[in-house]
Image: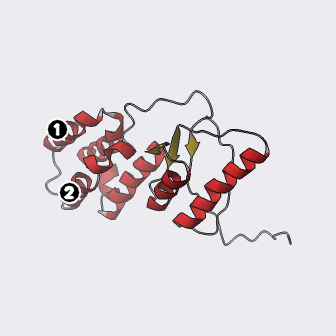
Amino acid sequence: MFPLVYVLLSGKDEIIYSRFFRHIRYIAELHQLQLQPETVFIDYETETKNATGTVLPGVTVKGCFFHFTLCIWRLAQKCGLKSYYKENEDITQLIRQAAVLSLYPHYLVDDVWITTLEDIGETDNVPATTSFTDNMTESWDEIYCFLWNHYFTERPTSPTPWTVGTIKLRRDSTMPTPNI
């Protein structure tokens, strides 16, 4: 799998993503290419998921593993666990175990998470742990499991999957910009 298109979009809403997907299909048709991706990997934006389902019906939508682990790390930071991550091995293992939940079969995720919560040791003295574990339990449950679970995801051997993600660009660049 390799990226075929890099694009800068003017926003992050469903209309813009839909126009983007339609335009890609249009360009493919102009060049007599048939684009029929089986899977699209997204970065957990609802707008991207909705646009993908509208423009590419029947395609399997999966969340990107990298972006899943990034969400877990951001949650840990938001809950105040960043400094404990380096200092407390139990906190480190808790966050790492949360990040790899998507690699377990979906039917084992609950059991693995409960076992993780039972096995973590000295975290009672870290109040932020409760916030993190509660959020993980409530937000990343079976409702979204089909999106982020990758245990049964076939690894791509050809460029049939699409990956949709966002990157941040520096806006304070001191480099001169060309006049277009």
In the structure shown, which secondary structural element does the residue marked by tag 1 occupy? helix
* Amino acid on which disc 1 is placed: Thr
Q: Quadrant of the C terminus?
A: bottom right
Q: Is residue 7 left or right of residue 65?
A: right
Q: Which residue is mark 1?
A: 115
Residue at the far right: name it: 179
Q: Which residue lies at the image location 61% right of the left edge and 29% below the top edge? A: 158
Q: Nearer the viewer, residue 75 or 37?
A: 37
Please name the residue shown 23% across and 45% down the image: 90
Q: Quadrant of residue 134?
A: bottom left
Specify few, some or many for label 2: CA neighbours under 10 Å numbering under 14, 14-19, or 20 or more.
few
In this orientation, does residue 88 appear? Answer: no
Q: Residue at coordinates 25% horizontally, 38% vertically from top-left?
A: 109
- Residue type highlighted by circle 2: Asp
Q: Is residue 9 above or below residue 137?
A: below
Relative placement, left or right, of 107 versus 150 is left
Measured Cα–Cα span from mark 1 to mark 2? 15 Å
Relative image position of residue 103 (x, y in whole percent): 36, 35
- In this orientation, which residue lies closer to the viewer: 25 or 153? 25
Residue 65: x %, y % from top left: 44, 43
* Image-based side of 112 in relation to 95, left or right: left
For label 2, the residue is 134
Q: Is residue 134 above or below residue 62?
A: below
In the rendered image, the quadrant that contains the N terminus is top right
Residue 39 lies left or right of residue 135; in this view the side is right
Q: Earlier in the sequence, mark 1 or mark 2?
A: 1
